[in-house]
Image: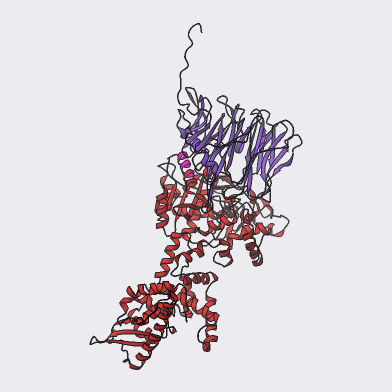
Chain colours: A purple, B red
Amino acid sequence: MLLISLLLLSSLSYAQKLPQLLTKHAPETLRYISSDGNTAYVKKNNGVLGLVMGYRSSDFMSDKTYSDFLITDSFEKIRLAIEVIPEHHRTLDMNKLHHIYVTRKGQDKPIEMGQGRYPQLHLGDEWISFYRPNDQQIVLRNILTTKEYKISLSKKSNPFFFPYYAMTSPEYFVYTDINDRGLAQVNLLDLTSNKSQVLLRAGQPGTFFEICQEKDYFAVGEFPYEGIQKGSRILTYPRSSSKPSGYTTLYSTNDADLGSMVCLKNSIYFVKTTSFDSTLVAKKTEAAKINLADSKLEIKSNLENVTQIILMDGRVLLPFRENLFVLEGTSNIEVDTLQRIPDEGE
Amino acid sequence: MLPRFSLSQYYKTILGMALSGSCLFSFAQTPPLQAPQSTDYPGMIETFEKLIGVDQTKFSKKVEVLLKEQKPFNETSAQNIRMDTDFLNSVVLHSNPGYIKLASGDKCRFYSTVITDLLKTSEGKIKNIIISYTDKEDRLHSAVLNKRDFLNKVVLNECPGISKHLRDFEIKNLSTTLEKILFEVPSSKDHCANIHLSWQVNPQTPFLCQIRDYIEEAKRGEGDPKDLQQRRQLAKVIDSKLTLVQKDYLENLCKNLDEKELFCSEFLNVSFWNKIASGLNEKIYLDEICKNALKTSTLSNLQYRECLSRLKRENDLCLYNPTTKEGLTPHMQCDHLSLALNHSQLRSNYADCPGVSSNQIFNNISRLLMEFSGEKVKNTIGQCSVLPTAQTLTFNQKADNDESWKLEACYFDKIKDREICQKTFFGSYDNHPYSYTTAVAQALINTRGAPSKITCNMVDEETFNPLLLEYKNGCHIIYNQANCTPTECPHRIVYNDRPFDLTKIKGGVDFEYFPLSVRTERLSQSYLIETELKKKQLKLHNTTMVKSYFKRAKKPLIHGIGCAEDLLPTFFRAQSLRQCSPLPFIIDGMIEDNDRFSFVIRTAVDSLQAPRIMSWSQVYSGVKSYQEAHPLKIWTLHAID
């Protein structure tokens, strides 16, 4: 039986017009680019991460030949977290520890923060958290004072579980986990007392929670893992200095959506399942945008197999095979215009 | 009276006409059975009943007359021996259509189905065979032969190859013969069609179906009641020589020799869990799932049955394993997992523990090696992931490529006054010379004067108890199961109740799955698969190539590398540009629906017993993204021919 969501049929027209990100850098080398295109980090062939600012290019970091680099920022846009992946093509270990550094965007030398995966910057980019799969611990560290918390996750059967986390205030840190019964949960760590409690728990096994945050709110999405036919939902919590508690249900469906949420000021992007073929156990997925104000949902792509959406310096990007589409933000930053020298007297 | 096999009589009539007009016609020379002169045509069944009535009368009369009048049959002077047309018509009218299909291949196949009692005439099981032949003067004769004479005077003369099958299927040789026969389980429609066709032309098939029919008849008490007791005893002996799987397989095959769809649906549409219950598949697929479901570390037969019955009702029961060793969880839900396993054919009757593997290259390569070699799992010490590690290492050693294995255990030898290093991996597999247990033992012999036959054990920290006598003496490598892989394993060594810390670990492993540079092409695993295993590889770029490969290949296997963020996006998220974690995988099945299809895939982090279903689009995206990240921009989706 082939189920086709009416939603998709009514929204195909949006998708045709998705622009590609055009920059003056070779697309496969680009690791980070600012919204104006003036600051970019590019990977060079010999294990070097280059920094390009305007017309100046320099070697920013170097490692072994087959190392790769990943760069993440936050909505606060102050610092960048850089992951160096050693032996990217030879040690194929999903739990391999990456070297994690932070730097002010386009400025100072990188400072090593530790080893782990999936770094996230928080609270004015003064805090960084990352996950160490070998210890099953989330490390939360203050970049300036080196104050550190180590948060141990519960024992679980999945050796490749990666949690999501967000520091919602100086006192509270939320993170996802899966308990020994296979139920996903969002935990809330009180940083003053160093005690955790469950903020939200899934009612059924086989789903995971995902977290993203913006200045005024953070969102929790519950989605089923690959191969599991269960519903999805997105909840929002207001961000304040007090303990997070009540949530608003922004979106709820029986479709097995993929997640990959990106939080913006007025909307949330995520990957939505638009059709499911139960004979072939195959689904079609597209980028979707939901407005926070009226919960209006729009399908934004027509690629049939969207898997990830990422946020970079305010620009929402959709990586698809060799292409990089822009869902929100300027797409053409290929052209440089020399700044006019001001006339005398100006 | 309707004949015994009343299925689709219309089909039989058509088939009878078709057969007598084609291949069987060549055996017939006497005038064919005549329809009655005056016939009413009130309906198909009545016509058919009349036809059978005519056949019955004519056949018995013909036998009666021939037995009275025929000249003695002399096989040395007889020429152009043919089956009598009335005899053939009777066979067509009274036999199982599947067996007629089996008989219609060629003359020898027809003879085989006669002597194995698969075909019937109006008198039931064939006792008398009517033949026609010409003598030296070219005169046409007919004769009735009993089955024994027919075998000795006709069958063995004209088809001497049958005597070998007769020998093979004697009771004393039956076990050995059955062991040699491959009862292949299909994993796709095309694969199944090939298997079905190969059984139809296999000269052993009549003899296999004879076994199945003999047992069934004895069980049902059919045939001559005088020797029923004796036949039942013999059937019991034969039955004991067949496994449950073989019995089910023969039941399906012999019932559906002319019904490919039904034969295949037994394999592809029946729940995989039912197949395990009937013994057609191994219990290993349920081991971890049931242990988790029943919260137990061992499983009795009763518990297996309880778990099997729960699987049919509780779709979420298959999601989790009790330990982290087995790999990525949650798996697919039970119904989808069953579908994937039904269409999968990669060898998976062992555990290779991707959850405690340090490099997924080892898991993928060893899965291919275990498939091709078929070798048994050897003795393992340490983590279960030493199996894929040691298998891949041995494969590279044989190809003179262990230079890339740079992981070494080193110690200072005071007599030689230098550091001695030995290539190693943590654990031991089949007493491999690089086993860490061997390296430590050698270091103890050279530095502590340990006896030359000393052996070392690997003991989990939780098990190790220095107060116990068994740990007071000898060499023990104590490690943490939760934090140890074959290439990285924090540990300590205790020798005769004292710590031994003279070994140091250096280096790592630099295996390349696909070549990363032109210089290292000959060291890559994909190159070695071609040169050492003599397997051709074909790059698959589009759905046409994929479909054509699956249609052509007897046992399709596709291996490759894709980005985990595209292959399994809910497990491995991307938060940065060009985030691609290379993840090897093996595709070993295809689920088809009209022109569309999905793959059955095991990524190297998935348990061998828990494949997943993935669309072409998803696999293509994963491989395409990895191509962008690859230093040589090569396409990493290879079919193995």
Which is nearer the eye, B507 or B94? B94
- Locate residue A296, reporting x and y percent: 60, 36
Q: Is residue B627 magenta?
A: yes
Furthest-left residue in this view: B137
The spot of residue B630 in percent (x, y) is 46, 40
- Taking depth in this image into account, of B254 and B388 the one nearest to the observer is B254
B22 drawn magenta: no
* Residue B52 horizontal side relative to residue A150, left or right: left
Q: Residue furthest top?
A: A345
Above or below for B5 versus A295 = below
Residue A239 is situated, as x and y percent measured from the top left of the image, at: 69, 32
* Residue A123 in view, yes or no: yes
Q: Which residues are magenta?
A: B622-633
Residue B624 relative to residue A98: left or right: left
Q: Closer to the camera, B211 or B414?
A: B211
Asked if residue B222 lies left or right of residue A220, the reply is: left
Q: Main structural element of the magenta stretch: helix, strand or loop?
A: helix
